[in-house]
Image: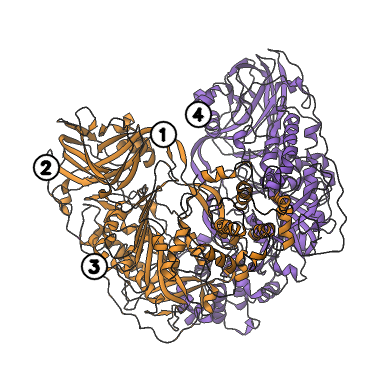
Chain colours: A orange, B purple
């Protein structure tokens, strides 16, 4: 499997020498050393776990240069050069590979080619040797980390602890900070909000993890994660709303309005600056932050209003949540007051912060990055937003329907508010908040309007895409192309706006579901982020802006291939339209004229069968006889050339229902018997990545070929028949009345291999996402006015 | 669920006061304090995360004494006593419970009763208040740890760092050691072995984790884990032996002999004592050790011969492995030489060790405890051996058959040797060891004799039970009653010997499979071990020997109930015998006279069906028509009184096979539709237990009722027809010849609820354990000479 590397910055020899000397790896007078002495020295430096020269020397016998000679024996011969195979037999061991089990001593470079590891050939001079080691320290080891980071995990950089300065190597920050002494403190930021309506500004708890060195006049940047889950998660999924109910007439819609909470302005910051008096009990929830904390970046977490330790109420997705998340940055930037404890007696400042803040986090934590970025708040330099919601309507609704995130049937704004309202856990806070929380729950329940599923002012206030013009910071989005929790439309639609802003912007699309990507084999994402944050928050010119393409997309056939694109949109492909035939085919010149029907039975059979939503979906897309019955299916011939579907497919369906209401789902599926990639990455070396020195670990992982399957969902979409005239407003329809639905499916980037077929499936109840009506409804589709258009390359 | 507590040592008031003062929890002049001031003070002391009095005071408003009053308001009223409900509303919060979600403010003690949490009533005096807090600090919090340990996780004991002494609280050692500075070092112990036959003593690598304080003249005890997996695991399960083969005529057996490796005596220890020069790269693999490391116990790991960093060869289960594991203790005790590195230039001593060593670990790591204990080596004071093998024949064989550990079909001694031969991973070592390793593999393969499955001198050398007279240390065994990897016979048979030795001995039997038990809800095992090791290795009299019963057995119906027994044997029950009837019943007066037959088809249908071994077993014991066919089944009536089956059921079966060879399996199964316990404990608060202060975590867990099942395996056993005359020697048999098999099933302690039935199943091929013949064989059972006898209480 390829260990691709995008974060290696081309570095000339003089700079290599300077950097290697700067970390005490290369002797200052190395030019006076013999080749063999220097070779031995540099191998020994790399063996960071041996602490004395004697111990390091003893270790040389554990390496082999060939199948007949150890490194110790080789060096004893005082060689003046080293063969490529000889060098890389040793190098592979240093990288953590095992002879015989991983590679063979007679062909190390063949193995390296397979792993996409860089090779420096003909090491016949001191210069070549130095360059080969520079490249080697910047090569990804078997555990996925750069060798220099593996050495760090063995304590190499403790020699620099206490020096109170950043150190860079190949453009990235090194873990030279004393992780034994990390400061973990809690402060209370005063907001301008009064969501609990007690006439006082809501205080919110902020947890800071920062290098001890930042108490010694070293200003450090902050990575801020706004995490509503940070204070704890109230498990309420058993109380999810019932989805086994009939559709309602959507014209009952009364356009519920967003209602703002009162404001109470916070005090302006004063001059006092007491040290924090409360220690953090929660931990960082994100290994990337820990990795960067060891490298000098403070890590800041705040749950925001309504979470444990904070005042106020959760109001899922509302502007108040944006505001409360943003105000933490104001404190970090010196523009807002915070206190040492909830009695507000003493002010405390983020005087340790250099004023440059980046944001990180996934899901809700990524969502709040989009939200905060749109405010243009001072100090926020960049966001790395993973699997983020860009409009809450696109999370819980679609085209006039209640549509669940995957594996969250019946969840909604109100329930997510409860999940995060962790200040209810502290009894003192509970006594005060509970009645107000109960009111807010009622408000959310009525205004989210699960009855009609329509868009409204209430949802409009939760659409961050209307405010992208406010974005001032640079931008990285990360999303899984198989994320059916936060569906890809969220990232796609915000990307179409962000890509036109005068800010540096990047997009990563991986093959995961709702998942992080910072420890995949196939891409050195962690190193890229190091490079990125050094550039954005420490103002070091390290080529970060030119280091990798604007859009990087992981291939769905071979996980270790990443496609490089300038954009992700329909425009990178060419339009093609397919039409159904009367016989169930799907063709460019399909000319179906029939009106074909299917009868939807809601969730009846699904519930009787007691299978999981996931099982249902797989059987359904495979065309299993029982489950395929309530659907129409149109299938292409086998493709004889590979192609890639890009952007958002668009479907037109002329359809009537036997009731004066209805929901239509459309799925685009790939058929073919193949070993497709695992749904989530496989853990390869559990806990094998040291984030610092004795400072927590992460696990290398990658998508790998799984057992044979018959089909895979490419994309799908859902629409309310009552929105045929206007996506934003329902219309009355009659039973039997044909309406023209025209809507887009979730965006994709899907490579179809030779021999695969495409299937267009038109159905109604989607067991895992739509409501599951109790009444049957027969849908009739007019094939003459039904088509799917997509973009291919 | 009950948080049972067995490690709380009854402590009189004066000692409570002394201990509370000693940890700076109770003010020296507490008798001069008012009740309300002292109440506030002690709550504030418990809030260890708040570091200043102001911060602690601010926190008091987050607690409630009732549904109308916060603790801050209550204290402002200057009360002179506190109601039981008021106190425990606060106490439950301190223990980590959440109001409303876990308990109700109007009935805290009702909740506490359900959780088996201790309550001190009528707290109307300073004395009562002090006692209530003493008991509270020694009460298990929601995360399963004692509250004092939760406080430790928040840094309470950092005030004692550097004081260089042990501190005890309620008989247990406190985490007063500076875990930021733990020493992690590697040394090389010289053995008397020369398993790689190079004429030199094999060196073995030993990894030591110890408190920094042990460099300052504080002698500490050592917990030693002999772990062949410590250097890494070579994945070879894909090369497991083929089990889809016919049985052989066992009389081909040639009684393979154990062959000892040469010895080369190590140097005697000298006077030099250099500090270690190599740092550990591996970590502790066992949270219990980490917990105890924070509490002053060094943690020592060694892989032994053949593992990474060590010389020599793996010889699974052989006396050489015992010897190499034992010799580490000799070094710890000062009786053997070790070096700083493999060049053997400098000697290094365990001068930090107080000479008292305990052993810990599970599976192979537990096995080596039994092995080492039998040597009576000086310095070894106690073993806590979990899920250990006591005879390797009982791991890979049974009654003349090759019988796999669960989920390990085709594994054997040779493959386990390869798994652990991690010194092959270092190329220098590989060049030297590989040819010798290849020879050893051949030797193991031929001598383990998968052909006949018979006992021999080769296996005899791997039966530790012959050497129990050598045991000098105290003894704790832990085993899962559902462990089908290391089957319970291993612990049962060694227990029958150990219980008669003049040593203190204990047994814990839990409901898990091959699993640890140190973080269950239902028992405070970690605290018990703290108490135990303090007693055994620090010579503190803390009542450990009288604190809990000799045998503790977890109930199979209610996971939070532990049975207290004096012994585990047939003798704790009464004998009862059941006989089959011609009609498939199993009765005390069963009088079957038939000869009934079934035809075994080996693994044919199983492999065609492509189901897992686990699936097969469940369907098979449930009596699924297809899978039950190759078996005879005899079922009791529903039991109208509950009973417990104890010890080892014994079966007699008169049987003939249609071939001149054969294997018989017998299973005892409980039938009944119930929600039985999960196979493994459910994780309840992932990472919620702090092992020290910022020093790693563990997870609370417990068996909980799972989905409804129809049957559960109680016990089973297997026997070769050719061993009917002698378990140790095969006999010729003829096709059709009736032989009398008489053998014991695995031991158990199984509570049958009212309404359950017992089923006796007689079959041949056990898909997950026996060989799976390619040829059919028809077995005929003479019911008149078939019975099952067991012991019940």
- Residue annotated with mark 2: A734
Q: Earlier in the sequence, mark 1 or mark 3?
A: 3
Q: Chain of mark 3?
A: A
How far is the residue under mark 4 from the one under mark 1? 19 Å
- Which numbered tag is attached to residue A615? none
Q: Residue B246 in the image: x percent, y percent? A: 64, 21
What is the quadrant of residue A478 in the picture? bottom left
Q: Residue A661 in the image: x percent, y percent? A: 17, 44
- Residue annotated with mark 4: B610
**Residue A256: within the magenta?**
yes
How far is the residue under mark 4 from the one under mark 3? 59 Å
| Range covered by the magenta-colored residues | A255-259
**Residue at the limit of the structure toward the bottom, as seen here:** A271
Q: Residues within 10 Å of mark 1 (few under 14, many from 20)?
A: some
The residue nearer to you, when weighing B59 against B470, is B470
Q: Earlier in the sequence, mark 2 or mark 1?
A: 1
- Residue annotated with mark 3: A259
How far is the residue under mark 1 from the one under mark 3? 52 Å
Q: Quadrant of the C terminus of chain A?
A: top left
């Amino acid at each position: 499997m390829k260990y691709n590397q995008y974060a290696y910055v081309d570095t000339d020899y003089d700079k290599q020498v300077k950097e290697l000397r700067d970390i005490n790896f290369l002797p200052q007078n190395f030019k006076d050393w013999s080749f063999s002495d220097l070779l031995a020295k540099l191998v020994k430096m790399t063996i960071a776990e041996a602490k004395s020269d004697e111990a390091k020397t003893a270790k040389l016998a554990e390496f082999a240069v060939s199948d007949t000679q150890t490194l110790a024996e080789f060096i004893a011969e005082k060689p003046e050069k080293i063969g490529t195979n000889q060098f890389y037999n040793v190098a592979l061991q240093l990288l953590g590979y095992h002879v015989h089990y991983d590679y063979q001593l007679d062909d190390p470079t063949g193995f390296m080619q397979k792993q996409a590891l860089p090779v420096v050939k003909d090491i016949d001079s001191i210069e070549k040797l130095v360059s080969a080691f520079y490249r080697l320290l910047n090569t990804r080891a078997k555990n996925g980390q750069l060798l220099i980071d593996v050495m760090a995990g063995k304590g190499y950089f403790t020699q620099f602890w206490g020096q109170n300065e950043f150190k860079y190597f190949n453009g990235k920050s090194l873990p030279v900070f004393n992780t034994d002494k990390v400061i973990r403190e809690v402060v209370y930021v005063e907001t301008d909000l009064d969501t609990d309506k007690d006439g006082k500004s809501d205080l919110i708890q902020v947890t800071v993890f920062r290098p001890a060195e930042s108490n010694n006049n070293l200003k450090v940047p902050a990575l801020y994660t706004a995490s509503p889950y940070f204070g704890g998660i109230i498990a309420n999924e058993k109380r999810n709303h019932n989805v086994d109910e009939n559709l309602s007439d959507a014209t009952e819609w009364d356009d519920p309005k967003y209602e703002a909470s009162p404001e109470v302005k916070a005090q302006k910051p004063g001059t006092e600056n007491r040290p924090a008096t409360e220690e953090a009990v929660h931990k960082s929830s994100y290994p990337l932050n820990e990795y960067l904390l060891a490298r000098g970046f403070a890590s800041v977490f705040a749950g925001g209003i309504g979470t444990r330790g904070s005042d106020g109420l959760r109001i899922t997705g509302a502007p108040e949540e944006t505001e409360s998340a943003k105000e933490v940055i104001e404190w970090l930037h010196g523009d807002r007051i915070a206190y040492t404890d909830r009695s507000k007696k003493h002010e405390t400042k983020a005087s340790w912060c250099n004023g440059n803040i980046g944001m990180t986090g996934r899901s809700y934590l990524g969502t709040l990055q989009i939200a905060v970025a749109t405010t243009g708040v001072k100090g926020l330099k960049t966001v790395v937003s993973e699997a983020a919601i860009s409009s809450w309507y696109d999370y819980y609704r679609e085209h006039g329907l209640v549509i669940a995130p995957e594996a969250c049937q019946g969840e909604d704004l109100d329930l997510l508010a409860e999940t995060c309202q962790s200040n209810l856990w502290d009894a003192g806070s509970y006594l005060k908040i509970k009645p107000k929380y109960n009111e807010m729950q009622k408000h959310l329940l009525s205004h989210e309007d699960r009855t009609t599923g329509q868009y409204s002012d209430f949802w409009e206030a939760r659409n961050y895409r209307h405010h992208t013009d406010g974005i001032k910071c640079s931008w990285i989005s990360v999303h899984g192309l198989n994320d059916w929790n936060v569906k890809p439309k969220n990232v796609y639609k915000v990307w179409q706006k962000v890509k036109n802003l005068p800010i540096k912007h990047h997009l990563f699309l991986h093959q995961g579901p709702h998942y992080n990507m910072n420890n995949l084999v196939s891409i050195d994402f962690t190193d890229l982020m190091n490079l990125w944050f050094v550039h954005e928050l420490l103002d070091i010119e390290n080529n970060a802006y030119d280091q990798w393409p604007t859009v990087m997309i992981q291939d769905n056939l071979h996980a270790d291939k990443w496609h490089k694109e300038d954009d992700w949109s329909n425009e990178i492909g060419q339009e093609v339209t397919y039409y159904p035939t009367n016989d169930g085919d799907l063709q460019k010149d399909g000319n179906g004229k029939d009106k074909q029907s299917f009868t939807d039975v809601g969730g009846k059979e699904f519930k009787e069968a007691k299978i999981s939503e996931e099982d249902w979906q797989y059987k359904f897309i495979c065309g299993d006889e029982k489950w395929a019955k309530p659907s129409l299916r149109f299938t292409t011939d086998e493709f004889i050339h590979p192609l890639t579907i890009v952007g958002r497919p668009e479907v037109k369906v002329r359809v009537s229902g036997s009731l004066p209401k209805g929901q239509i789902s459309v799925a685009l599926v790939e058929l073919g018997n193949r070993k497709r990639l695992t749904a989530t990455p496989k853990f390869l070396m559990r806990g094998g990545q040291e984030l610092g020195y004795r400072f927590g670990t992460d696990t290398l992982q990658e998508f790998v070929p799984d057992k044979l399957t018959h089909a895979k969902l490419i994309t799908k979409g859902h629409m309310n028949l009552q929105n045929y005239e206007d996506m934003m407003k329902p219309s009355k329809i009659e039973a039997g009345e044909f309406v023209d639905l025209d809507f887009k499916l979730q965006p994709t980037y899907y490579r179809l291999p030779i021999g695969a077929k495409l299937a267009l499936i038109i159905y109604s109840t989607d067991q895992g996402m739509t409501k599951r009506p109790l009444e049957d409804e027969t849908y009739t589709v007019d094939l003459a006015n039904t088509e799917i258009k997509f973009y291919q390359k």
